[in-house]
Amino acid sequence: MPDHASAWDLILSGDAALFAIVRLSLAVSLSAVALAALIGMPLGALLALTRFPGRPILVVLLNAAMGLPPVVVGLAVYLLLSRSGPLGAMGLLFTPSAMVIAQTILIAPILAALTRQTVEDLWIEYRDELGAMNVGPFSRVTTLLWDARFSLLTALLAGFGRAAAEVGAVMIVGGNIDGFTRTMTTAIALETSKGNLPLAMGLGLILVVIVIAINAAVWGTRLWSERHVG
Amino acid sequence: MRAPSSDLPLVLENVSLRAGATAILDGLNLTITQGAPTLLIGPNGAGKTSLLRLCMGLTAPSSGRITWGGRLDRAPTRRAIVFQRPVMLRRSASANVAYALAQAGVPRKDRASRIADLLQRVGLAELAHRAARRLSGGEQQRLALARALAREPEILLLDEPTANLDPAATRGVEEIIQMAALSGIKVVMASHDLGQVRRLAGDVIFLLRGRQHERAPARDFLDHPSSAEAASFLRGDLVI
């Protein structure tokens, strides 16, 4: 990426480095959302449907974990993955995989906490009907997740927004290596500190436009399927 | 999959249900067997809905015992219930029926024909692919009946299924109930509508303040109630 070009020039000229950064940002954040959904949503639904001593404390901790500071998560993952850390032998530090791991840890609590609330509300409505159909515990979880799917899309968007916007975690565990682990947010931070404000601003605008486009696509899908499927 | 065991007779022995200090149902003794529909009537708050929930096994009695075909096991096998305001799953009409069939253990390969058959039975064949929550009140009630019938119940419990429907929709629902009763399903139904009691009931259970006040063949009860309270309820007075 040439130092003195504006973001606009880079888009118009189809700058390969710029598109690699956009691609990596999306790949990391979307992978993290997918992994966090696989982990967080079933756990959130399970927490919604079970009662045990200490549950209120767990709910409060989970809700609090939505506010985990990205740099703290980044630091924790850094310590886990660094050469001398417990998982150091896997050689993941400063790779896109490390960034996916950190962002997954960051947003899994968001998805779990929002799923817990959504499923718990739906369960109040469905409890008698599912009881009358003799629905077992496992089917309850899958039924409620499926029937809450439109509300859960919003949770997914919240998770994606958090992942796409954060810079602290990916900076620490990814290292902002040019052409390898540089994302939109770390590039913006770098260009800003270099004083290249027009380029930083342009990259910021591209990021915002991408986030809006993804939200619009998801919302359109939701409206369409609500009309046709229920 | 048909369970080998039967849910009939349904027997309540000295059943009471309390919420804190208030008795919702008090000392009920009741046997439900094969036959024409049994209608539960009585003023609001008499305990009709609570009694249906107990019969379904959704709530456990505070004291006394309930048996289904001699078993104490509350898991519903051969019975189904339609609530006063049934909850539609956020899926199409046919997917709602498919779900009920799956939960009743019907093998996947048999479901398509059963869905078509059930929707036909309740007159919703044309609306199979419509989102269930966008159906009208009467259509939702009929879909709930299709879901209940999907369980191939021996006992069908209905909680004022026509309470919020216009006369045309009410007739549609009553026809389905009559067909179900004729096919050998024991219908136990709460109703507010004395005309409906006359049209559907084989016998009547009159509940008052959580107690079974009277049980009699429908014609006898409607024409010659044996208690003063039943007589004034039938006249349309407020019975407290």
Image: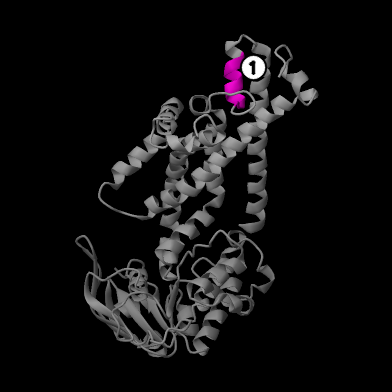
B215 vs B132: above or below:
below
Coordinates of residue A168 in the picture (x, y in percent)? 49, 24
The residue shown at (44%, 25%) is A71
Majority secondary structure of the magenta segment? helix
Badge 1 is on which residue? A200
Q: Nearer the viewer, residue A177 or B14?
A: A177
- Whether residue A28 appears in magenta in the rendering, the answer is no
Identity of the residue drawn at 37% across and 40% down? A62
Q: In the figure, B99 relative to A229: above or below?
A: below
Tell whether A103 sits left or right of B57: right
The answer to whether residue B118 is visible is no
Above or below, comparing residue A90 to residue A151 in the picture: above
Query: Of residues B239 and A46, which is closer to you in this image?
Result: A46
Residue occupying the point 57% across, 36% down:
A29
Quarter containing the C terminus of chain B: bottom left
Report the span colored magenta. A182-191
The one nearer the camera, B55 or A226, is A226
